């Protein structure tokens, strides 16, 4: 979503810090950028549409300042034009904003009656005017911020500079993330850590309804009653290369290559002396007789994989919902339902809203989250962190894998608790976990096979992914990966459903990627693949070593990708790897912007 950076200090030129910080936030997705800085006791604002280099080209190289705020905008209200870019300035207030003010029209009308005039279409300009209005009324900056915050509905994080206090940056947040980074004679605000890693790895999480006032040698944080808080200073564990590409051409390829370590880190967090610890160190799930999994995008697809595993092995019904649907529909749950929110960023607006809906109904909630201290992580009753590290590429890969792993562990954990899995079987399953990282590594090394498949599809306009059961859930994620980075339209289809209409689209040369890993239903799926093959489809078969032996002399496929065998609870962690890399290699052949696909943002913090 939008990105915020702010700097105040004596050691550096604020403009350099702002531009570098905005570049480090580019992965969040944006369509314009801007900065505000103090120059000769005035606030200068420079902003531009498009990439940050367009903004840089507008900045006089002689400018030098020790305080400023910057912003990358992903348009919500108002098209991506300079007039709508941040920073916005009204009266004596200049702000940058991440989030969305849902009642901005009503506030705009009220402020226009007070004489305010607006030049942009944005909710942010209204928020700026509101702060200015209350500052003029109260003559107190924190009171003005609090009053403005209480009037605004929606999510926000602000960086603010007041004309009559050019030594301090003010900050406040409700539901959008904001950190205060701690330097030596310099301090920063930022939407998240990569923006400031070049300068410091020490930071403070600003919590909901807290206010910060920072200058070059002091950070003050206040609660909603303006009591000064003594907040913990965290140290970001990842080193700079975590946010850099580590020698890979794209963050996405780096992050796929991170997957073996992510799998290891994610399950080892529960292990003290042996793998059996996993069962006792996961949250207690004994009281629940139903799970609602709620998420968006790839996290939703992870939930669909989890459904297959939990229902099969823990014998518990699982309902998987898109968060954007869940929050507006009737839900049937009770105190024995656990609502599981899956979110890499922990800031996805729809998923956060779904969490709040569940909590309003006193339903227990569990977050499966990557970003430590994110809104969903902090508001869910319980949280399990996936240890995926910073995921920069907009298309999620390693975080998706870790989400699926946690759901597989939940299936085992719940299965043992409900006696649908024996402890002995559970230990055997867990012992197979230790082989997964190496098997993923081996799959990644088969990159030439995926390049070959990419060659057959990169010029296509349409493509089908087929699968049944868990393979259907996997095909949905494979389809999304391909769509979001290569811009090729693709559809994931339940193999058995094709003949009910969609098979009319299959013609000579139609590309089909068919996934067959489930030995309980492989023959059914193979017969569906034969139906598309008979109509001229070009079929790439993704199957296991064992099933390949069964079909190696068949002619219903044009090429195959063979997946090593694993315990059925972890097989999906292997199957998805070729799908991720086929999408990556296809997007590369098409010369697309792989880490920052058009129209997309890493964290969708608006509805
Ligand atoms: C996946 O590659 C996409 N970037 C998108 O579907 C993403 O999974 C979705 O927006 C959910 O994000 P979250 O996990 O941060 O909540």
Image (tube, rainbow, N blue to C red):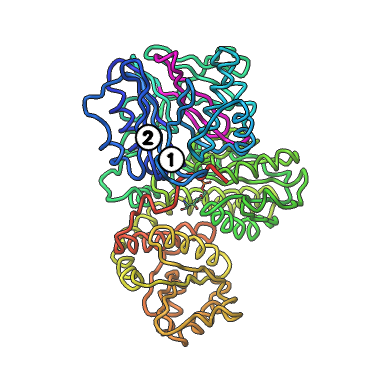
| x and y percentages locating residue 16 in the rendered image | 28, 28
Crowding at label 1, few (<14), some or many (≥20) Cα neighbours within 10 Å?
Answer: many
Name the residue that disc number 1 marks: 73
| x and y percentages locating residue 328 in the rendered image | 69, 50
Crowding at label 2, few (<14), some or many (≥20) Cα neighbours within 10 Å?
Answer: many
Quarter of image, res 145: top right
Task: Say which element carries label 2.
Answer: strand
Q: Left of 419 or right of it: where is 240? A: left
* Main SS category, magenta section: strand
Contact (CB < 8 A) between labels 2 and 1?
yes
Earlier in the chain: of badge 2 and badge 1, it is: 2
Residue 491 vertical position relative to residue 316 in the rendered view, above or below = below
Quarter of image, res 72: top left
Task: Say which element carries label 1.
Answer: strand
Name the residue that disc number 2 marks: 34
Q: Which mark is residue 4?
A: none
| Mark 1 Cβ inside 8 Å of ligand 1 | no
The residue positioned 62% from the left and 47% from the top of the image is 413
| x and y percentages locating residue 593 in the rendered image | 33, 54
The alpha-carbon separation of the residues under discs 2 and 1 comes to 8 Å
The range drawn in magenta is 153-181
In reply to whether residue 154 is colored magenta, the answer given is yes
């Amino acid at each position: 979503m939008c990105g915020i950076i702010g700097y105040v200090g004596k050691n550096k030129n604020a403009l350099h810090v702002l531009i570098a910080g905005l570049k480090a936030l580019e992965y969040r997705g944006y369509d314009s950028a801007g900065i505000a800085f103090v120059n000769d006791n005035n606030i200068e604002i420079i902003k531009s549409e498009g990439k940050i280099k367009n903004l840089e080209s507008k900045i006089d190289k002689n400018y030098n300042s020790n305080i400023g705020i910057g912003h990358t905008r992903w348009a919500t209200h108002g098209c991506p034009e300079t007039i709508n870019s941040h920073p916005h300035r009204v009266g004596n207030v200049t702000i940058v904003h991440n989030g969305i003010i849902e009642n901005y029209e009503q506030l705009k009308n009220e402020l226009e009656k007070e004489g305010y005039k607006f030049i942009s279409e944005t909710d942010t300009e209204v928020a700026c005017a509101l702060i200015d209005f209350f500052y003029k009324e109260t003559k107190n900056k924190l009171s003005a911020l609090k009053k403005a915050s209480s009037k605004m509905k929606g999510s926000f994080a602000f960086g603010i500079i007041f004309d009559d206090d050019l030594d301090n940056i003010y900050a406040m947040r409700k539901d959008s993330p904001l950190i205060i980074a701690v330097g030596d004679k310099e301090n920063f605000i930022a939407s998240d850590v990569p923006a400031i890693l070049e300068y410091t790895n020490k930071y403070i999480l600003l919590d909901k309804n807290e206010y910060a006032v920072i200058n070059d040698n002091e950070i003050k944080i206040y609660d909603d009653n303006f009591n000064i808080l003594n907040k913990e200073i965290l140290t970001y564990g990842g080193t700079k290369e975590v946010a850099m590409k580590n020698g890979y051409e794209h963050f996405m390829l780096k992050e796929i290559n991170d997957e073996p370590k992510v799998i290891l880190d994610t399950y080892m967090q529960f292990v003290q002396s042996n793998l059996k610890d996993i069962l006792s160190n996961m949250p207690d799930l004994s009281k629940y007789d139903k799970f609602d999994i709620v998420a968006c995008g790839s996290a939703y697809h992870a939930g669909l994989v989890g459904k297959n595993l939990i229902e099969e092995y823990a014998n518990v019904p699982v309902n998987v919902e898109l968060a954007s649907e869940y929050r507006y529909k009737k839900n049937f749950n009770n105190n024995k339902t656990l609502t599981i929110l899956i979110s890499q960023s922990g800031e996805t607006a729809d998923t956060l809203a779904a969490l709040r809906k569940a909590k309003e109904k006193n339903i227990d909630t569990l977050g499966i989250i990557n970003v430590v201290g994110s809104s969903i992580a902090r508001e869910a009753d319980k949280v399990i962190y996936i240890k995926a590290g910073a995921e920069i590429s907009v298309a999620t890969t390693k975080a998706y894998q870790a989400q699926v792993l946690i759901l597989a562990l939940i299936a085992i954990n719940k299965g043992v608790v409900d006696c649908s899995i024996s402890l002995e079987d559970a230990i055997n399953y867990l012992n197979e976990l230790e082989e997964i990282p190496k098997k993923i590594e081996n799959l990644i090394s088969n990159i030439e096979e995926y390049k070959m498949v990419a060659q057959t599809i990169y010029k296509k306009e349409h493509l089908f992914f087929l699968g049944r059961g868990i393979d259907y859930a996997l095909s949905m994620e494979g389809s999304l990966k391909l769509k979001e980075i290569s811009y090729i339209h693709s559809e994931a289809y339940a193999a058995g459903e094709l003949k009910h209409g969609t098979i009319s689209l299959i013609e000579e040369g139609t590309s089909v990627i068919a996934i067959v890993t489930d030995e309980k239903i492989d023959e059914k799926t193979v017969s569906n693949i034969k139906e598309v093959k008979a109509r001229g489809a070009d079929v790439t078969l993704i199957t296991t070593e064992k099933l390949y032996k069964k079909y190696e002399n068949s002619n219903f496929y044009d090429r195959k990708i063979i997946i090593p065998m694993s315990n059925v609870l972890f097989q999906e962690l292997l199957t998805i790897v070729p799908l991720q890399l086929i999408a990556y290699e296809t997007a590369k052949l098409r010369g697309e912007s792989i880490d920052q696909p058009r129209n997309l943002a890493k964290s969708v913090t608006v509805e």
